[in-house]
Amino acid sequence: MRLKKFVAIGTAVVLSLSFVGCSKNNNKNDKVNNTVSNQPSTEGTDDTATDTADTTKDDVLSYANIVLGESYTDISTTIKFYNNRTDMNLDDYNGKKWEEYVADFNKVYPNIKVEIDADTTYAESALLRLQSGDYGDILMIPEVSKSDLSKYFVSYGDLPTMEGQVRFASDMAYDGQVYGVAYMGTARGIVYNKAVFEQAGITTLPKTPEEFIAALQAIKDKTDATPLYTNYAAGWTMSAWDDYISGTATGDATYKNQKLLHMSNPFENKADGTGPYAVYKVLYDAVANGLTEDDFSTTDWEGSKGMLNNGQIGCMVLGSWAYPQMVAAGDHGDDIGYMSFPITVNGKQYASSGPDYRLGINVNSSEDNQKASMVFVKWLTEQSGFAYNENGIPVAANDNNFPELYSAFDGIELVSDDPAVAGEEDFLNLINADSDLMVSAGGNTKVQQIIEHAANKDMTFDEIMADWNAKWTSAQEGNDIEINQ
Amino acid sequence: MTAYTDHKKKKSLLQWVKSRKGQQSIIIIAFMFIPLLLLFTFTYFPFGEMIKFSFYKMSYSNTPKYIGLDNYKEVFNNKEIFASLKLCLYYMAGSIVQLVIALYLATMLSFKTKGGNIFKGFMFFPYLINGIAIGFIFKFFFTRGFVFDSVLQWCGFNLENLPYWLRTQGLNNVSLVGTSIWRYFGQNMILFIGAIMSVDSEMYEAAELDGANKFKQFIHIILPSISTIVTLNVILSITGSLSAFEPPYVITSGANGTATYFVLMNRIAHTNQKVGLASAMAVVLLMIIFVATILQKLFFKYAFRNTNAEDQVVSKKKTRLGVKKNKSKEAI
């Protein structure tokens, strides 16, 4: 009897104790959150103060105020840089490796040690680590709501100041503060094999969807190459198509983050052959006409690089970041070219350009580490030559040293998406989640389904787009978002 | 009883702690504390949280919003989720095939077979390979013109007549189930062999004397003797097939109509960031597994009822005979 009672009481005590433990933790978290969310507001006031009084310069951490080689040289610390470029840690990486950048950085700041922590499944791991609090000092900002930026990251300064410093500043801005600096910019186009195009008799690059499909047909007829390789199986290569529907297909910087949210039926067929419909139709038509690989379900991303390099593939729809990888994948690097996506808006071609991952600085790091981190970010954008070496669009606002691959972009206007209007920052996330379309947010499945339906011929392209429109509209209505476009 | 407690009450707590019984209790509780704490923190607490999440509309970073049973309604109304549940049928059918193969081979190998141990080793081996590695092996195995197609071409098939193993919807699920069978039948087989070993070999001799062939021996001796293991294996495979994840996730990444419940749940939770909906899916899956397990228990109770009854009758007869014999001995 006693024993049983005692055991029962004992377990009850154990369970309640662990409850207490949990609730304590919760309180702690709440406290941290509170202090964190208070921080940006105070910082904001400080920043406005610096505009008037330059004497407080050194006290407030601000990107613009850092003078490389002069500011914060007395700091001696170790910062952790958490990123996705595992390839830059490898000995056989044929560009400049992380350790070389860090060595260069240490010539200027010998006392700031930089540890590189690279992860192959970055996008998912980073989100989890963000929750756990263990995310280094500098990291590439994963998919978080804009309103949560201040919870995790330090502000680099206010938006007008930052726009004078770096390109794409508005991309990670919230409430007038900038929380992310791109590590390089990319443009959206098509990476292709010049030799294959030449062999197929294509002399001028296609500028409209019709010309593009005709060019693919010519490649199929005249060469042995696969005209367009979809990279269906890799998944993320499919959601890359989402990047072409805004700037590239409309020439409108406000399309993606402002107009799309309020648009009724954004996926419908526009009479002038622009917009998302035109972009996805290129893919549907290419598959339906047999201009893509034979068996899409077993495409091989790593293998596709070499195949494009040696002329077994005509082209692939990928951002400019892919170009150096294709060049490096074989002996025919000179054959690789980069062209814009074949859509012409009112007689003019546009190309979406945008930041690659943005670097954020951990708001919970020590003050010294935050300073050191910001110094490193500024050094990486302004003095390291990183963007140029990686074939990216330079990030520093006054740097116009574009790499060679953009030679085919003469006369093509680069459009970088404007951020959402204040108060609407989360609308795209909300619509994306509820419609399951995940536009520009890992929506692999929907683009893969275009290929499936095109290959199985069980749904016409218009039916697919009508389905998407319906989902989009119901998500807009479900979140009480006004439809006014 | 009352006298007993009265007597106890007189002792103070300290005395009780010092007593043998008190020491026993303290030791038991001290030993229980850590495992219970671990069990609670890593199993019951997260599980409780998950049930809580299933009533909220939430992502990893947003503030959760209470929406009642909406997530559960969504689980049952969403066509994609329903389609993914139907895929379980492929895996269930596969698990039946797998058990039949395993049982057949186990029976063969438990009789004297030349090189039996080598065969056992070879057939058990796939189970030891990491699931992700198996995924990559079969990705290339099924690629057009690669391993599987080449082997079939050696056998005289023409590449043009062969289907696309992963591209054709419907067939691709069969291909994936195939990899799962390949991986797990060896493990089932070993379990069956273990159970069959425990059957008394005299039974076979007796059956042979009575003129029973191998098949009859299997039906009437082996199967009833290993019914527990068969039940266990069926339950494990069916629940396993409800939660199939690795083959579709690695080989096709759930595309092209191969997204099983788990793959879809993973996508909804991590890509679409609907944590609430994914939690509701998990709770629903748990319920389905409960129901499936109970149904199977009932079914096997029914299926093996005759053999058990027969056994009982036989044993009763035996005891009765024994008693009689004893009695007769006594009489003598």
Image (cartoon, rainbow, N blue to C red):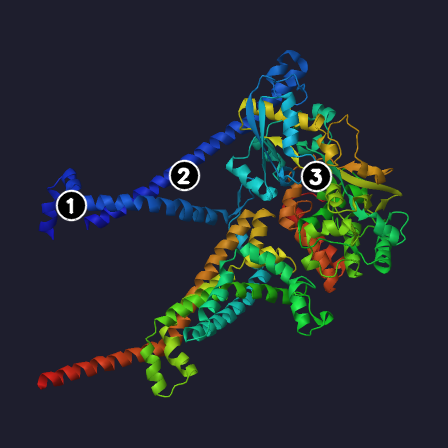
Q: Label 2 belongs to which residue?
A: A22
Mark 3 vs 2, N-terminal side: 2
Left or right: A154 as drawn, with respect to A2: right
User: Relative to A306, is A158 above or below?
Assistant: above
Tag 2: amino acid: Cys
Q: Are marks 1 and 3 in contact (CB under 8 Å)?
A: no
Judging from the image, mark 1 belongs to the subunit labelled B
Q: Are marks 2 and 1 on the same chain?
A: no
Quadrant in which the C terminus of chain A appears: top right
Mark carried by residue B20? 1
Residue at image point 20% right, 46% down: B24
* Disc 3: CA contacts within 10 A as few (<14), some (14-19) or many (>=20): few
Q: Where residue A19 sits: x, y (%)?
A: 38, 40
Label 1, label 3: how many angstroms apart (C-alpha)? 73 Å
* Disc 1: CA contacts within 10 A as few (<14), some (14-19) or many (>=20): few
Judging from the image, mark 2 belongs to the subunit labelled A
Residue at image point 86% right, 60% down: A221
